[in-house]
Image (cartoon, rainbow, N blue to C red):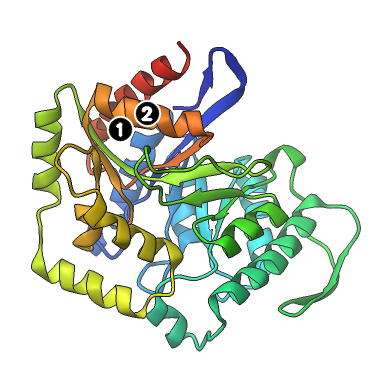
């Protein structure tokens, strides 16, 4: 799904899927589910695969190891939370995977997370201050991975002295870096550390073009079929309305300081029309954490083309329930590319 756009030779799309979570399904089958989703994603042409990290889930680096063992090209996009590990450990993991597999790792730098996770870890750092910490943390990782002289850094959140990374990382395997760009603090951090700013987008007709000088991506689910009615039938079967999930969502809203969580919740009522392919019912029912585009290949392709025309070049998809779902998604992206390159 990585495509050069005809007539726009300097632009390409990078598509990432998302790995299955250890909190869903049976423990005994989890490793196989990781391997399956990774292989499906690679066969569908995805650039990489997002691996979540929070207090409920097993370690994302161990999951990434499974992904690397079961694929030949797919790049893990590992969620990195500063309160979980020292920046040297992150750099060492990236360099170690590069040494063992010759594979590039992407880093999804996470400033926050679930509020209760932060409380349990005694992290009381305010929202915007967490992004200041993220900038410092990521700079240390980048300097270590860049090689050269030993790294010394005396900062507010991290101090190292004459620290050098061995084995060094090949320059062509330097990680791609993503960060949430839904808040002003997140967008500012992305600009400072040279990261791709990823957001949970508004409907294409409501979304704004990304700021110049920063890579931009969106996190979105897709359910597309040849006919729109079939797509909506599948969508409603997969994500039925659930009162318990709605209450969980409302509770999460009360304790969350996440900008994207509040923005999506405000958008839900405004985009509830059956005429819109932009669908937030799974988010409102706490079944997934991103908006969906639902409809025919043509209709979903039109909406994707509008995001692409605005300047969004990275797309992180939701967890695919079946291999065929990624093939249907491919059809929608092809329609989008056909529209953009006319």
* Residue 44 marker: 2
- Quadrant of the image for the C terminus? top left
Residue 260 is situated, as x and y percent measured from the top left of the image, at 42, 61
Residue 130 is situated, as x and y percent measured from the top left of the image, at 59, 74
| Residue displayed at 50% across by 89% down | 122
Seen in the picture, residue 63 relative to 120 is either above or below; the reply is above
| Residue displayed at 37% across by 66% down | 262
- Quadrant of the image for the N terminus? top left
| Residue displayed at 23% across by 63% down | 286
Residue 147 is situated, as x and y percent measured from the top left of the image, at 83, 52
Residue 212 horizontal side relative to residue 244, left or right: right
Q: Which residue is mark 1?
A: 326
**Which of the 4 quarters of the picture holds residue 228?**
top left
**Sequence-wise first label, 2 or 1:** 2
Seen in the picture, residue 146 relative to 308 is either above or below; the reply is below
In the foreground, 264 or 153 = 264
Q: How many marks?
A: 2
Residue 6 horizontal side relative to residue 157, left or right: left
* Residue 103 marker: none
In the foreground, 332 or 93 = 332
Residue 230 is situated, as x and y percent measured from the top left of the image, at 10, 30
Q: Is residue 183 shown to the viewer in this render?
A: yes
**Which of the 4 quarters of the picture holds residue 269?**
bottom left
Q: Are marks 2 and 1 in contact (CB under 8 Å)?
A: yes
């Amino acid at each position: 799904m990585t495509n050069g756009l005809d007539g726009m030779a300097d632009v390409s799309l990078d598509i990432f899927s998302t790995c299955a979570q250890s909190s869903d399904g049976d423990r005994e089958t989890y490793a196989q589910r990781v391997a399956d989703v990774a292989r499906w994603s690679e066969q569908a042409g995805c650039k990489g695969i997002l691996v979540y990290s929070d207090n409920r889930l097993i370690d994302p680096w161990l999951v990434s190891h499974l992904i690397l063992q079961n694929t030949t090209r797919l790049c893990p996009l590992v969620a990195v939370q500063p309160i979980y590990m020292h920046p040297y450990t992150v750099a060492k993991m990236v360099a170690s995977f590069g040494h063992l597999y010759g594979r590039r790792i992407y880093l999804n730098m996470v400033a926050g997370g679930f509020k209760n996770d932060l409380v349990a870890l005694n992290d009381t750092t305010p929202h915007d201050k967490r992004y200041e910490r993220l900038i410092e943390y990521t700079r240390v990782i980048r300097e270590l991975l860049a090689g050269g002289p030993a790294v010394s850094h005396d900062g507010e959140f991290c101090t190292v002295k004459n620290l050098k990374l061995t084995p060094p990382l090949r320059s062509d395997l330097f990680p791609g870096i993503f960060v949430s760009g839904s808040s002003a603090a997140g967008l500012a951090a992305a600009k400072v550390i040279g990261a791709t700013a990823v957001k949970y987008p508004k409907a294409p007709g409501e979304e704004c073009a990304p700021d110049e000088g920063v890579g931009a991506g969106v996190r979105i689910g897709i359910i597309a079929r040849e006919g729109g009615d079939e797509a909506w039938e599948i969508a409603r079967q997969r994500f039925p309305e659930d009162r318990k999930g709605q209450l969980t969502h409302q509770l999460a809203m009360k304790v969350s300081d996440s900008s994207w969580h509040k923005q999506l919740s405000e958008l839900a009522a405004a985009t509830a029309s059956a005429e819109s392919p932009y669908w937030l019912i799974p988010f409102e029912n706490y079944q997934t954490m991103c908006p969906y585009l639902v409809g025919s290949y043509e209709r979903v392709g039109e909406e994707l083309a509008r995001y692409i025309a605005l300047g969004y070049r990275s797309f992180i998809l939701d967890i695919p329930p079946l291999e065929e779902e990624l093939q249907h998604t491919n059809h929608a992206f092809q329609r989008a590319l056909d529209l953009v390159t006319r």
